[in-house]
Image (cartoon, rainbow, N blue to C red):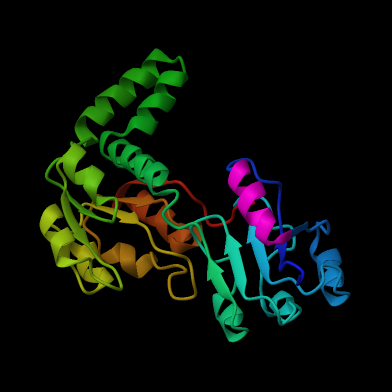
Amino acid sequence: MSPKPVVLHVGEPIKYNHDFYENELCERFEVVHNGDLDRESFIKALKSKKYSDFSAIYRPHFQTGGEMGQWDDELISLLPPSVRTFASAGAGFNWADVDALGRRKIWYANGAGASDEAVSGTGLYMILSVFRNFTRSQLAARTWDPEKFNACHKLTATISANPRGHVLGIKLAYKARAALGMEIYYYDVVPAAPEVEKELGATFHGALHDLLRVADCISLHTPLNKHTQDLMNSEAFAVMKDGARLINTARGPVVNEDALVEALRSGKIAAAGLDVHYNEP
């Protein structure tokens, strides 16, 4: 019997789906765990073929398994020719150079879609927060200072708005349309199917700045790559409506934070809800 293909497991042991892991994955593959938890030792292990000619890399947790740092040409060039698949948890692929992987004929697969429900729920909360100024109100209440609380109460009454009827540029569309009564305008590289647009009453814009000019709230859901880094920069904020709002549940570097701070200070942007930041640990 020929030996089972080897899968290199990076990161912590699995936490879920133990039956499938033990009865399906481990029956068909030999799973070996990476024990070299820094870039230097991991490179040494690859050069010495410590993990043999493995066929795939498996990273089941998006919060672990990144000890070796960025998967760039330096690392990818050291992979054995037998590697054909890199399967990673998480919705993005900015930590791995997919072009370099492609040149080695290695498929990169992520967990896109698995987090849709959680992220869309977070996005919905952020939309409500930037329209109703929840964070400002909560911080004022937590000061236990009646003067600050009353001042905030008076201010938020004049600057807050209801989301209903406002234009939202996103893919968090179903919840925002059904729960908040928002109008859905969007921009994407590939338009949604006609039946999806019809169901949502969604309006497609063929250029980002065309969408920015009409949206009351922009919600970002784009992957991070060389084309989308600093996508929301000074020029992008400049074409937005005065007092528009921004939600980012994608990747931090999609928004140039210096430009965002300036837009907030000038009042060009009324509020921002950030699930991610430009520089994260």
Residue 213 placed where, x, y %? 20, 64
Secondary structure mainly formed by the magenta segment? helix
- The structure residue drawn at horizontal position 66% and vertical position 75%, both measured from the top left corner, is 72
Residue 151 drawn in magenta: no
- The structure residue drawn at horizontal position 29% and vertical position 56%, both measured from the top left corner, is 171
Q: Is residue 278 left or right of residue 3?
A: left
- The structure residue drawn at horizontal position 65% and vertical position 60%, both measured from the top left corner, is 58
Is 158 rendered above or below residue 205? above
Residue 138 placed where, x, y %? 40, 25
Which range is magenta?
18-30
Q: Is residue 47 left or right of residue 112?
A: right
- The structure residue drawn at horizontal position 77% and vertical position 69%, both measured from the top left corner, is 3
Q: Quadrant of the N terminus?
A: bottom right
21 or 196: nearer the viewer: 21
**Could you tell me how many numbered marks the image carries?**
0
Q: Is residue 88 left or right of residue 11?
A: left
Q: Residue furthest front?
A: 1
Residue 210 placed where, x, y %? 20, 69
26 or 239: nearer the viewer: 26
Q: Is residue 220 left or right of residue 70?
A: left
Residue 24 drawn in magenta: yes
91 or 143: nearer the viewer: 91
Residue 189 placed where, x, y %? 30, 73
Res 178 → quadrant: top left
- Residue 60, visible in the rendered structure: no
- Residue 84, visible in the rendered structure: yes
Res 238 → quadrant: bottom left
